[in-house]
Image (cartoon, rainbow, N blue to C red):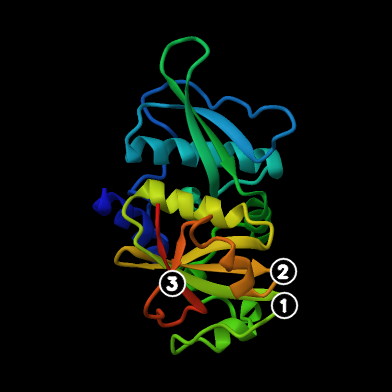
Amino acid sequence: MIRTCMCLLCALLAVGAVSAQTAPAASTGTPPLPAAAGTPYSATVPVAGTSDVQRNDAIAAALKVVLQQAAPGFVPDAGTLSEASGYVRDYHYRRAASGGGLELQVDFDPGSIKRLVAQGGSNGAAAVAGAPPASNASPASAGAAAGGTAPVVAGGTGTIWVGGIEDSHAFASVLSLLRNDPGLHDVQPVAAEGDGVMLQLGFSAPLATALAALEPPNGHLVPAAQPHAGADLSFSWSP
């Protein structure tokens, strides 16, 4: 599972394929199902099985459906589809209503989808390589290039490092935890190394304060013993 996760995370660095897959879910012969009414950022699609490859294929297909719902006529490029898992808030398997096969309900992060549509495609090589555009830089990220701690900033954009991600489920759980926090927004993975990932995010309260609520015993982000270079704050994931 560690190798599978690394395929997922390292794809962020090369704008390559998440688990080397960009096509819609294979072997089903059935077009994606429409999302439930009132949920334009969710889609339910057929899925051939529960492996990482099959799930990532289905997530890419679901992203195409959601982008059409959010911006009719928007055609995602290959780079966007290869990063589909990075926009996921949550997903659930379920038995198809017909009783034949599985479906995957995928809920995407609304803020991430809006940002993607506004940008007109994938995040671009600079962001994926771990270098956010200069216009997005914040005092917090600028002051942490040497691995220092984040200044107390009431709002802005920063970066955090999360290590200890052992599989793709843990990666999805990290994104879900951060994207569901009301004090954070626009959470995007921008780089990966070893078993960790660098994430850029916006915050409305001081970054350290917002993330403190996600530490044990109520959360899963354990402050790292050593800071990670380039991150405002560093953590280790605790399932």
List the residue tagged with mark 1.
154
Q: Earlier in the sequence, mark 1 or mark 3?
A: 3
Quick check: marks 1 and 3 in contact, CB under 8 Å? no
Number of residues whose C-alpha sits closer than 10 Å to that of mark 1, classed few (under 14), some (14–19) or many (20 or more): few
Q: Is mark 1 on a helix, strand or loop?
A: loop
List the residue tagged with mark 2.
204
**Three-letter amino acid code at the position of disc 2:** Ser
Rendering coords of residue 41 (x, y %): 65, 41
Q: How far apart are marks 1 and 3 (CA)?
A: 27 Å
Number of the label disc, if any, that sits on residue 129? 3
- Rendered position, 70 above or below 79: above
Q: Is mark 3 on a helix, strand or loop?
A: loop
**Three-letter amino acid code at the position of disc 1:** Ala
Q: Which of marks 2 and 1 is nearer the N terminus?
A: 1
Identify which residue is drawn at 55% across, 60% down. 214
Number of residues whose C-alpha sits closer than 10 Å to that of mark 2, classed few (under 14), some (14–19) or many (20 or more): some
Q: What element carries label 2?
A: loop
Q: Can residue 72 be seen in this view?
A: no
Q: Distance between the residues labelled 3 and 2?
A: 25 Å
Number of the label disc, if any, that sits on residue 52? none
Looking at the picture, tell me which residue is in the foreground, 157 or 41. Answer: 157
Rendering coords of residue 211 (x, y %): 58, 67
The answer to which image quadrant residue 228 occupies is: bottom left
Rendering coords of residue 185 (x, y %): 65, 61
| Residue with the most extreme front position | 217
Q: Earlier in the sequence, mark 3 or mark 2?
A: 3
